[in-house]
Amino acid sequence: MEWVGDRAMTTPERVIERISLYRRLLDSLKGEGQATIFSHELAGLARGTATQVRRDMMTIGVTGSPAHGYRAQDLIDAIGLYLDSPEPEGVALVGIGNLGRAIMAFFQGRRPNLRIVAAFDVSPEKVGRVIHGCRCHPLDDLERVVREEGIRVGVVAVPASAAQDVADRLVRGGVRGLVNLAPVRLHVPPGVHTTHVDITMSLEKAAYFARQRAGRKEGEP
Amino acid sequence: MEWVGDRAMTTPERVIERISLYRRLLDSLKGEGQATIFSHELAGLARGTATQVRRDMMTIGVTGSPAHGYRAQDLIDAIGLYLDSPEPEGVALVGIGNLGRAIMAFFQGRRPNLRIVAAFDVSPEKVGRVIHGCRCHPLDDLERVVREEGIRVGVVAVPASAAQDVADRLVRGGVRGLVNLAPVRLHVPPGVHTTHVDITMSLEKAAYFARQRAGRKEGEP
DNA sequence: GCCTGTGAAGCTATTCACAGCT
DNA sequence: AGCTGTGAATAGCTTCACAGGC
């Protein structure tokens, strides 16, 4: 984090999104044995511009060399330092329907520092089971478990009608960051961050822009 | 749509996202019998500002009255005119895992104009079945079916390793708008729009912003 | 040459501020 | 008084352009 005077310069969301993406790209790159990368290469993978990549590198304090570009490991480390919490962080997942299970499956051992450690559902037949290595609790225990485990991040994967109630409980339990997958806008107190993942909206958007074809030669989305 | 000369003024993504959201909010509002709405009310629901709502109204060409605000039905109609295709539009969904099924379930009769009409999967035991009223085809038929049905919008809900291949097939079949749920960046030819829905990224972002504490200061050059 | 790092310029999106209406 | 519609101002983000280094 950068500071100006005694005020924290909070990094823009867009930058956080991009460096999260960079890390994933670099991870898979490293699997292929590539040790260094130029800004224009990373830009190509991330579908951005080289200048923007270099700006982002400035933001996270990484510096490369004109001869070889950036060392992939440097980037990964710097991004980790920038994005991750120093200690492992637990995530609560609420709603173990198809969506919830998809998220669990996907997150399985993906980032060691950010693990789904508790799941919640109203459905009694899911409670008590262990899905993808994660214990399932009844919804009524949400606030207590979240507080006891010191969980600060929650994922809302319940139907729209239940989303606000679930968010309220999570916040009461101490959660400060939410990912909401329900197609509603949550109301949360100041100091709690929520990012909305709205698949309906994305589909409508894609349909709209699909119908905007016949654009001139200009290429980039 | 606005035009400048003979060139389409393409509406910014952000605006499309917001008006899609407005419509959903208005739909549920109408269910409760509210016929008119002020900009500040809609802004409250959408977590935006009243000015921004009024700007968006300008964009889609809706005008309200100082006395009663906007007529909800006017807004819904105008948004439909702006966002929706004149004829019903089919969507192809690729990947019938948890994520794909969640999307199907959610979209069930949601927007009459935008329906998932074909699903695809590699897994033989899914093929041939009808899930959520939608026929499941083998992946090999993707290009043919998409072309035959004139499908222009596709949803990629397959594992990361398969996403680019699926996207290529969709595009070859004639798709011009993609929603990608896999955690990779797709490479598509100019003229094809893709919107990325990246749950991993959202989670990392939420975790980052949840942690607004006085952390380390970035130091050594 | 081709690269990085970065001040400055250029754009885009959002907000301000106020005229005009009811 | 309270609201809409909107030019003007502002804030935020991206790209340009070039100095400096291999």
Image (cartoon, coloured by chain):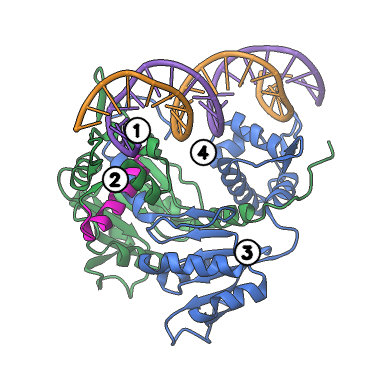
Chain colours: A blue, B green, C orange, D purple
Please state which of the two labelled residues, at mark 4 or mark 3, is closer to the viewer: 3
What's the CA distance linking mark 4 and mark 1? Answer: 30 Å
Helix, strand, or loop for circle 2? helix
Secondary structure mainly formed by the magenta segment: helix
Between marks 3 and 1, how big is the CA–CA gap? 36 Å
In the image, B26: left or right of D18?
left
Residue type, mark 1 in image: Arg
Q: Which residue is mark 2?
A: A207
Nearest to the observer: residue A162 or residue A65: A162
Which type of secondary structure does the marked residue at label 3 adopt? loop
Report x, y in % for residue A148. Answer: 66, 76
How far apart are the alpha carbons under marks 2 and 1?
23 Å
Disc 2 sits on a residue from what chain? Answer: A
Give the mark nearest the N terminus, 2 or 3. 3
Residue A215 within the magenta-colored segment of the rendering: no
Mark 3 or mark 4, which is nearer the start of the sequence? Answer: 4
In the picture, the disc for residue A152 is 3
Q: Is residue B107 above or below residue A131?
A: above
